[in-house]
Image (cartoon, grey):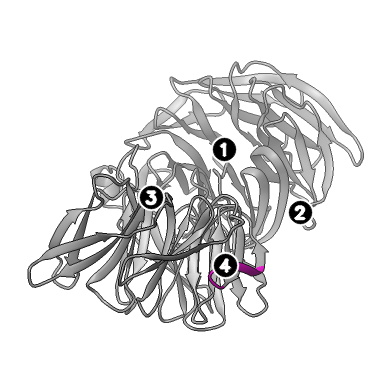
Amino acid sequence: MATATPEERAAGGLELQAAIGFNGHVAAGLICHPDNKHLLYPLGCTVVIQDLASKKQTFLHGHTNNVSCVVVSRSGNYVASGQVTFMGFKPFLCSVVVWNVSKREAVCGSPASARSAGNVTIVECSACRDEMFVTAGSETIRVWELDLPNRKLRPTECQTGQLRRVITSLQIADDDNYFYVGTSTGDVLKVNTRNKLMTDFGPQKKFSLGVTALLLLKTGDVIIGTGEGTVALCKGSNYRVMKNIQVHGGVTSLTRRGQGHQFFVGTKMCQIYRVNYTAFKEELITTCHSEAVHDIVFPFGTSDLFATCSKDDIRVWHTPEHRELLRIVIPNMTCYAIEFMRDGKSIISAWNDGKIRAFMPESGREMYVINNAHSRGVTAIAATSDCKRIVSGGGEGQVRVWAIGEKTRKLEGVLKEHISAVSCIKIKKNDKECVTASLDGTCIIWDIGRFTRKQMILANTLFKCVCYHPEEYQLITSGTDRRIGYWEVYDGSAIRDLEGSLSGSINGMDITSDGAYFVTGGDDHLVKMWDYNEGTVTHIGVGHSGNITRLKICPGNKYIVSVSADGAILLWKYPGCP
């Protein structure tokens, strides 16, 4: 957990109810548990255990940074996970240490590779013997034997003749007689465990972008996953492709469900697929954003749906089942902000190409586009409660008011006082006034009927977020100075100043409909719930490993949903909600 004040340490914990996300960049990070009832996978600094039947999730906490590797013991009793240690960390093995798990002590150790060989990136243990394992990496494959009485490790370099390969994946056969390695070149090498000699390699036509994952079947066939997203069933010593499918993103994990008829595929685009052996057809079972999530919104008056936006897409989710209902894709573009129109007839969105796009919330069909809405991308957006106007903010600092008719979109006014990007817009309930927060250190309250400035709030910060108190006589703001400011709407004067975080910017905030509590999130990765009148932290949520970008309290106060720069969406139980 990030540094906390004594008051924060005394605060209650927010209960993590569900996590939408999967870090598909972790090699072999998706694992089917030996009980065949659960999947395990990393998400940020958490390991998620998901029941395959009920989809219920359990969370293993304890890491302080992104989980970089996960493994489950043969019995299924133990889960081991490692984390990224510091910036610039490279996942190479410098030395091998064998541990006694029950005694929690090291048995012996040895340098991981010979001086003539390259870095080791993979370790795979034998399926039947505790005293044998294989390591591989850049131009090195070694079989290790543990001599327990003498506390010694004895490695033997495997002979691959003239072949020089960088090993990207490794699987040992269940009977231990052979193991297979996949290479960055796109072929597979089969090695005899006893004599340490390569027996065959193939196919002749290499797999594009390397063999990144392997799965061995009882039949002797091999399932190959590639960096291009191909999953292929291969037969014989020449690895002839019998069947193949294409998934979204390079394959990083292949894991089988017992000796049954299914296996699972994890990809770099953070998708999880279930595949039937016989039909060899893929079914997408988990999907999420693979890039930073920039915004999260609920439709007016309902907690059952919410929408998020990221690079390339907007997604609509079903809250109770944590399931994606709709994906709206605009390739190679980034969506910075979204809003459901109050009447529920459209989703409006702000994009880095300077366009405002509106979509139907059920079909995702494009309704209209406002071209050249802002010259440096649209960075913030809000709509009036009568659905007749949109207020947008741009990277150049302008605030623009648009009249939205059934078939017309007309620019009504341009407000030009900000000199840097607009980060947040909130409109008053009467639709006559709005407040805009900007990275230029100002928040401006505007009369959007007359298109004039009413008040300006100044602070030595880049403002990231602003909220009206529901009674609309006060505002709260925050940003890069980590302070939470309370301000008088009437004259823009400061009322109160709180320390919101001990490290990093506060990027998002939201307030309950009665104004009693508000939540904040930012670069310290913590979700904090505050008592508005007391100005104290009541609850803290620990689970994100990326910077929190936005968060929302759902209508009816059932959940708090927070989104982060690592693509994760976390749903927290609202304190006191049954």
Label ID, residue 415: none
The image position of residue 252, as x and y in percent, is 50, 57
What is the distance, in whole Å, between disc 4 and disc 1 at their CAs?
Answer: 64 Å
What is the distance, in whole Å, between disc 4 and disc 3 at their CAs?
Answer: 36 Å
Q: Is residue 386 visible?
A: no
Nearer-N-terminus badge (4/1): 4
Judge whether 439 appears above or below 83 on screen: above
296 or 519: nearer the eye?
Answer: 296
**Residue at numbered disc 4:** 239
419 relative position to 18: left or right: right
The image position of residue 291, as x and y in percent, is 56, 45
Q: As shown in the figure, which amino acid type bears the numbered disc 2?
A: Pro
**Residue at numbered disc 2:** 361
**Residue at numbered disc 3:** 66
**Residue at numbered disc 1:** 468
Q: Secondary structure at mark 1?
A: strand
Q: Nearer the viewer, mark 4 or mark 1?
A: 4
Q: Are marks 2 and 1 in contact (CB under 8 Å)?
A: no
Judge whether 161 appears above or below 404 on screen: below
What is the distance, in whole Å, between disc 2 and disc 3 at their CAs?
Answer: 34 Å
Q: As shown in the figure, which amino acid type bears the numbered disc 3?
A: Asn
